[in-house]
Image (cartoon, grey):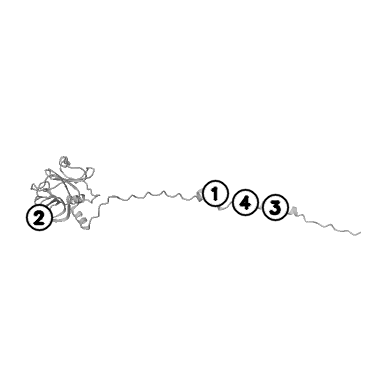
Amino acid sequence: MSRHRAQVRPRYGRIATLAGSVVVVLVATLGGIGALPSGSAQDDRAVDPAASAEPAAAPATEPTAEPKNEPTQESSEQSVRRQRSGAAEPEQGLVPIAPGADSALDEALPADSGEGYRVVFSESRQRVWLVAEGGAVRRTYLVSGSIYDNLDPGTYEVYSRSEDAIGIDDSGTMEWFVRFTQGPSGAAIGFHSIPVDDQGPVQTIAQLGTPLSHGCIRQDEADALALWDFAPIGTTVVVTA
């Protein structure tokens, strides 16, 4: 009787178990020394909200309001004259009260001199006031009115204006002529700078406050320019005794 050798079968279950154990030990070892990544970039952002937060939007800026009532642009010649006279730049047609040594009583606006936006001229006090709509005096100063009785108290209106003018019978040239009425002879009466003839100014600034003209109201150049800015055609002019 012959002998047969028994066939040996491989034990695959034991091999698989051993391989699995080796993998687990290897992963644990590598993870412990930091050799394996702990998570994705997306996970890191989830842990730190500030890393992915959108920047806060800047608050909307309120639109700047457009300026209103801008003064009309003056010509280059007007600008040169303004610099020469020392007059302040116009601010929406209004100018500040001019400083002076006159008493507060002399500078007080005459009673019963009208209402609203207007120019007031006192014959007895030889003074002009530029009065705003609300009644505030924007400027007051001494002038030289007529030596003749050719202007009656009352309410008038500016009807004509000239930057340059020539006096009757070549009595001189003047600037910033603002006309509001006419005298008995038909000649225009208004406000303007001190006339200049061949000899120079026909009077001094120190003489303002004394009647010296033949009908109009003479002003220092800076004051004449201020009234020009203040009194367009249609402006009320009140003449008091």
Residue 7 is situated, as x and y percent measured from the top left of the image, at 82, 57
The dot on residue 46 is 1
* Residue drawn at (55%, 52%) of the image: 42
Q: Secondary structure at mark 2?
A: helix
Number of numbered discs overlaid on the protein picture: 4
Whichever of labels 1 and 2 marks the residue nearer the N terminus, that label is 1
Q: Secondary structure at mark 3?
A: helix
Q: Amino acid at mark 1?
A: Ala
Q: Amino acid at mark 4?
A: Gly
User: Quarter holding the N terminus?
Assistant: bottom right
Q: Amino acid at mark 3?
A: Gly
Give neighbour class at mark 3: few <14, some 14-19, many 20+ (Cα, 10 Å): few
Determine which residue is flagged by label 4: 31
Q: CA distance from mark 1 to mark 2?
A: 94 Å
Q: Secondary structure at mark 4?
A: helix
Give neighbour class at mark 2: few <14, some 14-19, many 20+ (Cα, 10 Å): few
Determine which residue is flagged by label 3: 20
Q: Nearer the viewer, mark 3 or mark 2?
A: 2
* Residue drawn at (75%, 53%) of the image: 13
Q: CA distance from mark 4 to mark 2?
A: 112 Å
Give neighbour class at mark 4: few <14, some 14-19, many 20+ (Cα, 10 Å): few
Q: Nearer the viewer, residue 171 or 183?
A: 183
